[in-house]
């Protein structure tokens, strides 16, 4: 084993050793399918570290995510599908091709111009007959998928001309929810409201998945404060009146943010 564990080749060697016939029994049994849950979990742990702005934790979680990539590449290598160098070559080639304003002679505009050009270049690469929306994986969380397909549609000009129109649409959808009667109608209208919210957030450059994760975390901290205060005061949260619970909630908001 190489002494410099900061070397990428050393890490590749470790993963290959784990998958070797005399390596780790657990690692040897894994397949592309069996380790899918770990890839998803590690990606979310990276997002959590970013939300917490914990750079030490981010460094560690990026390593865990990189391990999942290396495991998939090693499994593919063993079956003759592709190797890690093919992964690296593929993304390097794509980056150069999609940045002609950096690696070629194309003029460099502002960030919005670059984003539009990116979508045009992606369109040139797309197989004939495929939708511009097909590049968004449907396994994504629903809010993220909604943002992705709306962004792709906007990239070919299908978008609101101004932000006010989106807000008006949101108000319209809330009105339709108020008038909905059946469970099926309510599900439909809630979906339309969420879709409109994603659009509004996209226009404001807000990631709704991140916004909701942070809101969930705030609720968790505040609710834990309420539970701890009840315990300290020898009270039971469920026995408090609505006004008492609300007062405790406001206290939690002021103390834990």
Image (spheres, rainbow, N blue to C red):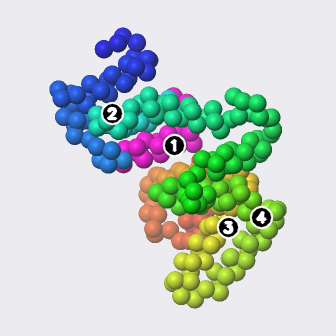
Of circles 2 and 3, the one toward us is 2
- Considering only order in the chain, which callout, 4 or 3, is on the residue closer to the N terminus? 4
Question: Image height check: is 207 above or below 200?
Answer: above
> What predominant SS class does the magenta segment belong to?
helix
**Residue linked to disc 3:** 196
- Considering only order in the chain, which callout, 4 or 1, is on the residue closer to the N terminus? 1
Residue 69 visible somewhere in the drawing: yes
Task: Point out residue 26 in the picture as x, y percentages from the top left corner.
Answer: 22, 37
**Residue linked to disc 1:** 48
Q: Quadrant of residue 171?
A: bottom right
- Considering only order in the chain, which callout, 1 or 2, is on the residue closer to the N terminus? 1
Residue 145 visible somewhere in the drawing: no
Q: In the rendered structure, are the residues bearing label 1 and label 4 in contact, judged by CB atoms less than 8 Å apart?
A: no
Q: Quadrant of residue 177?
A: bottom right
Which residue sits at x=74%, y=54%? 204
Q: What's the magenta region?
A: 37-56
Q: Which label belongs to residue 140?
A: none
Question: Image height check: is 113 above or below 140?
Answer: above
User: Which of 185/34 is in front?
Assistant: 34
Which residue sits at x=80%, y=34%? 107
Relative side of 91 to 175, left or right: left
Q: Is residue 150 magenta?
A: no
User: Which of 162/181 is in front?
Assistant: 162
Marks 3 and 1 sit apart, C-alpha to C-alpha, by: 26 Å
Q: In the rendered structure, are the residues bearing label 4 and label 2 in contact, judged by CB atoms less than 8 Å apart?
A: no
Circle 3 sits in a helix, a strand or a loop, which is it? helix
The N terminus lies in quadrant = top left
Q: In the rendered structure, are the residues bearing label 3 and label 4 in contact, judged by CB atoms less than 8 Å apart?
A: no
Which residue sits at x=63%, y=67%? 195
**Residue linked to disc 4:** 160
- Considering only order in the chain, which callout, 3 or 2, is on the residue closer to the N terminus? 2
């Amino acid at each position: 084993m190489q002494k410099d564990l900061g070397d990428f080749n050393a890490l590749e060697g470790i993963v290959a050793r784990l998958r070797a016939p005399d390596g780790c029994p657990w690692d040897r049994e894994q397949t592309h399918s069996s380790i899918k849950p770990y890839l998803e979990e590690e990606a979310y742990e990276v997002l959590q570290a970013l939300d917490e702005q914990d750079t030490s934790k981010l460094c560690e979680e990026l390593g865990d995510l990189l391990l999942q990539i290396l495991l998939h590449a090693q499994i593919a290598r063993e079956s003759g599908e592709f190797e890690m160098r093919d992964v690296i070559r593929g993304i390097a080639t794509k980056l150069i091709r999609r940045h002609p304003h950096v690696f070629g002679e194309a003029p460099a505009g502002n960030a919005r111009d670059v984003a539009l050009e990116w979508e045009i270049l992606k369109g040139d690469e797309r197989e004939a007959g495929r939708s511009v929306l097909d590049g968004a994986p449907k396994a994504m969380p629903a809010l993220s998928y909604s943002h992705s397909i709306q962004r792709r549609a906007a990239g070919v000009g299908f978008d609101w001309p101004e932000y006010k129109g989106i807000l008006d649409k949101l108000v319209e959808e809330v009105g339709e929810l108020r008038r909905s009667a059946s469970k099926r109608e309510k599900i439909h209208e809630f979906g339309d409201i969420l879709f409109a919210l994603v659009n509004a957030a996209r226009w404001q450059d807000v990631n709704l998945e991140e916004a909701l994760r942070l809101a969930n975390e705030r609720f968790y901290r505040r609710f834990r404060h309420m539970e701890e205060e009840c315990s300290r005061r020898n009270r039971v949260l469920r026995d408090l009146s609505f006004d008492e619970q609300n007062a405790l909630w406001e206290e939690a908001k002021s103390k834990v943010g």
